[in-house]
Amino acid sequence: MFYDFFKKDKNKKTNITVLVNELYSKLNNCNNLKEITTVSISFLSQKLEAPTGLFYIIDQQNQQLNLSSTYSISAKNIRHNINLNDSIFYNTLTSKNIEIFQNIDKLGSKFDIFTSYGDHVAIIPILDEYKNIVAVSQVIFFDYSPRYEELKTIINIIAEHIIKYQKNEENKKYFNLLDKYVITSTTNKDGIINFASEAFCQISGYSKFELIGKSHNILKHPDVDKTVYKNLWDTIKQGRIWKGELPNLTKDGTTYWVKAKITPIFGFYGDIIGYTSIRQDITNKKLLEKISITDSLTSLYNRRYFDEVFSSHITLSKRIDKKLAFCMIDIDHFKQYNDSYGHQEGDNALKIVAKTLNKSLKRENDLVFRLGGEEFGLLYFVENDKDALDIANQTRIDIENKKLIHENNSASKYITVSMGLYIYNKEKMTKDEMYKKTDELLYEAKQDGRNKVKTNTSEEI
């Protein structure tokens, strides 16, 4: 019997070692939980010289024991699922100790099927490192005086393999979920991609083969200012986490937005060996934001956004030590244009003017707005008054050069614009005061014959 294996004290250490090595060898060759439990119940039954045995795995989610393996008895004759509150197992599950039942033929119908296999049953809990039960073994035998310490050594080995497998399976499930749903990647310290999740591939349009070994520059959006990437690299190279929102380009050139968190990976000696990036797709959020601040006809920023950023641009001009130019633009005699050519042609003219204004301002902090009707606004930073005037005047010329016929325009036979230009130079002023002064300059440009720029500086065009 099993306990005879340890009977001679002088051979106890050697015998335990042999038994442990044998069990480890068998379990290490198992590829799944079914094989682990099959080997375990066979090993226990054979060493105990028990005619039969059962092995159950705890299913905490459904609060039951699920039959995993049997020894020398057909599984079809055994209950496959047993409630955790079942009276036969309850003491074992609560005390977490091995329970031995004698004379099982007197215990009722629960053990009827086993009476021909023996008159004793051992119910053995399998515990993890936190003393939580992960499985239960049930062995039927005839006569047994157990040596509990030796038995626990074997049980601990079985528990170790079950727990290791379950943790590996849990990690696989977690990794599969991460791979499928989390937009993540890792790179070496030079930014060369060495891992990309399936979610990353799906949103970017690239396969893993196309991403691995490539720089993240493959996703770089041309509209992102170089200073953004410089700040990103300066941050992570110092061992700090960078967080921010970035537009990326898919393989086919489509723009998508991500909220990114880039974390340095440190080596054994504290040096940076790579970076991990986790991203969240915020394309829809950005689209809604854009819709809320964009004029639907011209695709320029709308009046709402102008009201949001006007004050911040005044503050920014002080911080970056540059002058802020605010230019209000009005299409000359636009009502007459609509009356003569129709509102469809009027809308077309508005789009052409908007496109021309957009082309005139290309720097990161330059903004173009449709303030309402035929009125537009420009916000841009300059080093001096002359630069502000040159930009405004060239824009005015570019619009007239579109040669959109406007027979009822008193200033030209084409569509033209009048401009009021206020150049802010750190004077104490609110946004409302600056707006009012610019509006007054626009009024002067109209009164002075239109197709002109009026400014608060000594020079006028």
Image (tube, grey):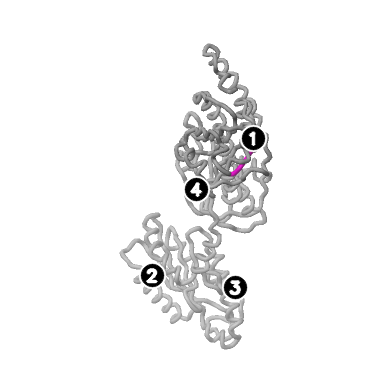
From the viewer's perspective, tell me whether residue 382 is left or right of residue 143: left
Q: Secondary structure at mark 4?
A: strand
Q: Nearer the viewer, mark 2 or mark 4?
A: 4
Q: Classify mark 2: residues with Cα within 10 Å, few (<14), some (14-19) or many (20+).
A: some
Q: Classify mark 1: residues with Cα within 10 Å, few (<14), some (14-19) or many (20+).
A: few
Task: Name the N-terminal-most of marks 2 and 4.
Answer: 4
Nearest the viewer among 48 and 60 is 48
Seen at 66% across and 53% down, the residue is 205
Q: Which residue is mark 3?
A: 401
Q: Measured along the vertical axis of the image, is residue 369 above or below residue 25?
A: below
Q: Amino acid at mark 1?
A: Ser
How many angstroms separate mark 2 from mark 1 (CA)?
Answer: 109 Å
Q: Nearer the viewer, mark 4 or mark 3?
A: 4
Task: Name the N-terminal-most of marks 4 and 1.
Answer: 1
How many angstroms separate mark 1 from mark 3 (CA)?
Answer: 105 Å
- Where does the N terminus fall, quadrant-wise? top right
Task: Name the N-terminal-most of marks 1 and 3.
Answer: 1
Q: Which residue is mark 2?
A: 456
Q: Nearer the viewer, mark 1 or mark 3?
A: 1
Nearest the viewer among 179 and 16 is 16
Q: Which residue is mark 4?
A: 261
Provide residue 325's location: percent of width, then percent of height.
43, 65
How many angstroms separate mark 4 from mark 3 (CA)?
Answer: 47 Å
Range shown magenta: 66-70
Tag 2–tag 4 contact (CB < 8 Å):
no
Q: Amino acid at mark 3?
A: Asn
Residue 68 highlighted magenta (yes or no): yes
